[in-house]
Amino acid sequence: MLELFMIYRWYNWSPAYGISHDIFHIFLFTSAGLVSGFWSSSLTEGFNLVCLLFGLSIIFSTIAELSFAFLFMRTRSREEEKDNVYFASEDPKWIFINRLTGTVLFVLFFGLLAQSILTLEIF
């Protein structure tokens, strides 16, 4: 919610904030999994496998978001930065980021589909 206000209300958001948030999120999620014993429990069968796949998809998507923010920060011009441009348009300079985003979404969609099918088979 804070990012939305920073982007659309106060116009002071930076990709560096997103990168910091993503690094903190990965650290927090991984640490919570270690402290709770989630990553060390038996994760190869049943519902535990579904939970593992979901946890890995969260980490994968957060790493992807971190990468997008970094690429966005490197690709965005000074003029776009001054104009508070926060999206990758159809401009040719954004093609790689847009295609990478589409690929990640494709992988995540089929990962969630696999998790759904496994869940249906379990229950």
Image: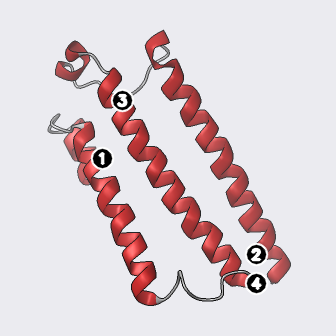
2 and 4 marks in contact (CB < 8 Å): no
**Of the residues tagged 2 and 4, which is closer to the observer?**
4
Q: Residues within 10 Å of mark 3 (few under 14, many from 20)?
A: some
Check disc 4 and report the residue beneath it. 46
Give SS at disc 2.
Answer: helix
Vertical position of residue 41 compared to residue 102: above or below: below
Amino acid at circle 4: Gly
Quadrant in the picture for the N terminus:
bottom left
3 and 1 marks in contact (CB < 8 Å): no
Q: Which mark is residue 72?
A: 3
Check disc 2 and report the residue beneath it. 119
Vertical position of residue 107 compared to residue 78: above or below: below
Quadrant in the picture for the C terminus:
bottom right
| Drawn side of residue 92 relative to residue 4, left or right | right
Check disc 1 and report the residue beneath it. 19
Q: Marks 1 and 2, how far apart in space?
A: 32 Å
